[in-house]
Amino acid sequence: MKDEKEKSYALTEKKENFSEWYNQIVRITGIIDHRYPVKGCEVLMPFGIELLDNITEKLEKMLKDNGNKKVLFPLFIPESFLRKESEHIKGFEEEVYHVTHAGKNKLMEPLIIRPTSETAMYPMFSLWIRSHKDLPLKIFQTVSVFRYETKMTKPLVRMREVMFFNESHTAHKNWEDAETEVKNAAKIYSDHFANNLAIPFIINKRPITDTFPGAVYTKAFDAIMPDGKSMQIGTVHNLGDNFSKAFNIEYIDENEEKKHVIQTCYGISTRALAAVIAIHGDDKGLVLPPQIAPVQIVIIPVIFQKEKNRILHESQSLYNKLKKNFRVHLDDRDQPIGSKFYDWEIKGIPLRIVIGPKEIEKNVITITRRLDNEKLTIDEKNVGKFIENLLENIQHDMLRKAQEYHKDKIIHASDKGEAKQAVEEKKFAAVSWCESMECAETIEKEIDASFIGYNSKQQDAKCINCKKAAEHIAYLGRKY
Amino acid sequence: MKDEKEKSYALTEKKENFSEWYNQIVRITGIIDHRYPVKGCEVLMPFGIELLDNITEKLEKMLKDNGNKKVLFPLFIPESFLRKESEHIKGFEEEVYHVTHAGKNKLMEPLIIRPTSETAMYPMFSLWIRSHKDLPLKIFQTVSVFRYETKMTKPLVRMREVMFFNESHTAHKNWEDAETEVKNAAKIYSDHFANNLAIPFIINKRPITDTFPGAVYTKAFDAIMPDGKSMQIGTVHNLGDNFSKAFNIEYIDENEEKKHVIQTCYGISTRALAAVIAIHGDDKGLVLPPQIAPVQIVIIPVIFQKEKNRILHESQSLYNKLKKNFRVHLDDRDQPIGSKFYDWEIKGIPLRIVIGPKEIEKNVITITRRLDNEKLTIDEKNVGKFIENLLENIQHDMLRKAQEYHKDKIIHASDKGEAKQAVEEKKFAAVSWCESMECAETIEKEIDASFIGYNSKQQDAKCINCKKAAEHIAYLGRKY
């Protein structure tokens, strides 16, 4: 299958034009093809699917360990169900797709296509939940969701078909149990981003104006992109009893009393992959974390006519040895070695092993790390254990490097002037804030940035706008 | 999560009313919940998802080994693309869902929801394919497809949202290569049905009236259900150049000549699971092939107060030993043992291990096969190897049993009277046929059955209708 590689235009420098670099990299490496004839809908190509399958497998495993059961709900939702929770419909009515006809018939009951699955799932919750013994109820699914975006779309970031949307939905006896689940979810996502994707983030509570429609509050995972913009890569919502009242999800408690359940939901999408690409990539292409790389090690034989058979034989035998424990690929294509290096470098494969006459003569293996181009020469005997450690080290090094970058992107500003300057320098401004939305709006306007969210509590600080006591640290910046 | 088990109505006898038995079993075992408020759309429940994930994983592995790359295409297709191949649109226009509005806007270009993905994929094929070096091109995806069925819907069999639809699409240089791919596909599906699902089938060429819209010919895998009806569980189509002409999919061959590619496509859906349920199940519930069972072995401790700790400890240690190589579950719920037996029996778990005082005293393990209730007592030491063999044997035994059943369902009829009788006895009639559609229609009418398809060639036989030379064996019966 031909991706757009053959055009082989020089890759834009990441620093120079991040957005252009990103758009090129997702196409050239065969993650997506953007030429599908419906706006905001992309084709996920084999390399993209392998990445997303690896990411999803790890995430689903963590969710199952948390007791969430995997299900699959239908795509179609009766339009009347979308309308049951009043805030929810307000949030989605502008961007929901309507199915009105099938064949040549007008549908009796108009359907919508899931923009998210609360209103598909919760009518079933009201059938499944009867007693406190049925709680907690925890499920998830990985599906496409559909939103008629009017903003500019961007591959994996803002799409009209959001693919690989992983949504969990839970129901609990009371507020405390739901709060515990919010913490569980935040822990799962934190571990997933840090340990699998090597992505740093801020966990922010969203201001009420930016809360998920129907939720009591929203906590979001924000990653900071190279252009200084914030990208929301995961969200966790405490829904309180807003939906359980709208959908009559009740249970009989231990004292024979009827109560509404308290619900949470949390979700994550292809944006996780977008963050991996954006944060780790460099001017030579992708740099993939070993945990999710479709190929962790590529073996490239350097074929000279004289030693050809021996080199190929050694390469094959190393491949056979490594494939038991690693995702390894032997690139024995009849192509110039430079073009092979290019192909695997741009795809961000963590380790490259070259086998040529020198290596064979000395019984060694030469390994190059994609992350920093570091070359290592090791004795052939210990290769398995060595590579295992090496991949672990790379995973750690990538997180550490990304954390340094992340830290550098956040400026603790003590007044609006400093905050404004931070945003102009394509960074986030962290400021003390009193919790008044009026102050938030004033700050937003004066420093020309968006109020992203707030998190940790602090003492003895004053709001940078009104100078009253400020319990919170708020983050301002530009966003996608 | 509460499935419908608690109703716990006695299961209908399979022989007495297969259709009712089937509808009960898919609900009670937690495969689907049929109460979703859109007709023909079901919720796939955790146990159903585990089964379908296992089936899909095995199938996708085989497709990848065949060189098919996994992709994901968008759900929406421009309506104008569906119309490009004239036979194709005729086949689907009555049952395709239309998306006309998004938010409060009428869409500029009306969209349809994929009923199958030829017309989504092939515009991209025309971009991806330039030269003979790009061929063969082989891709697949596993998605939901949507068809506005007007016939009675049935869980996993006939749905308006067909979930877990796995569709492969390939492009080749010439007819011969496409014919080879048809054989590859038929081999993959044959192996999948026989080795993973233990399902016997007939591979039938469909009469021209029943060929996939846009294909040159269709070969289908037909399984025979307990009620004698045929269920199509997989199809392979040679599309010739019908679509490549409609979508301009051309390549430059070795002699610099421009040619249209020859295409195939093949697909398989949740019907594979429906066949597993229908063919292997019995009056006590599901009987699952070990290859796809979400749980292969359940360990049930028989807890007496006196020996409680020791029994639980032994059960746990057996669980720890087995979980490295098998999908094993330890059922230590505080419930009567009878209800535990019931739960795992109805779910069709291949092996049940009971550990009680007797077993501990004698250092043995008692294993019961779900398939035939056979009890085996073995020394605790050899349990791993023993169970490995046992699961293999069960898988073989299930296929053999199903093949006997399948053979019994096919009557080789030498005239229309015998054929009619076979159909009345809820069986298939295999008859000699001359290849004239007129004869086919006459036979259909006279014996009150559908012409399912035809396959193997034969010599020296005469058509049961016109008595002319009959090269083919044709199958007639009732169908879903």
Image (cartoon, coloured by chain):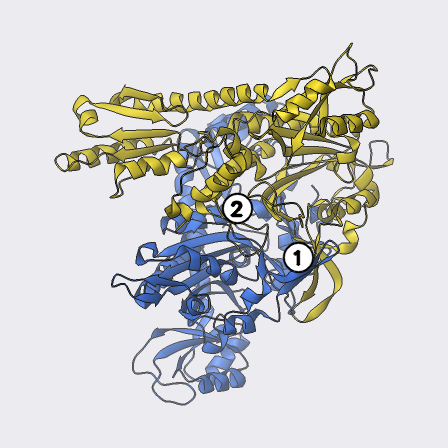
Chain colours: A blue, B yellow
The kind of secondary structure element at disc 2 is: helix
Give the label on residue A41, or none: 1
- Percent position of residue A66, x then y: 36, 52
Give the label on residue A53, or none: 2
- Mark 2, Cα crowd under 10 Å, few <14 / some 14-19 / many 20+, is some
Determine if residue B466 is in view: yes
A331 or A168, which lies in front?
A168
**Is residue A259 toward the left or the right of residue A447 in the image?**
left
Determine if residue B239 is in view: no
- Mark 1, Cα crowd under 10 Å, few <14 / some 14-19 / many 20+, is many
Residue at image position (62%, 68%) is A95
Q: Are marks 1 and 2 in contact (CB under 8 Å)?
A: no
The numbered mark, 1 or 2, whose residue comes first in the sequence reads: 1
Mark 2, chain letter? A
Q: Is residue B136 above or below residue A375?
A: above
A475 or A252, which lies in front?
A252
Identify which amino acid the numbered label 2 is placed on: Asp
User: For the N terminus of chain A, which image quadrant?
Assistant: top right
**Is residue B299 toward the left or the right of residue B185 in the image?**
left
Residue at image position (43%, 20%) is B393
User: For the C terminus of chain A, which image quadrant?
Assistant: bottom right
For residue A81, what is the image quadrant? bottom right
Which residue occupies the extreme top position in the image? Answer: B460
Q: Are marks 1 and 2 on the same chain?
A: yes
- Percent position of residue B69, x then y: 62, 39
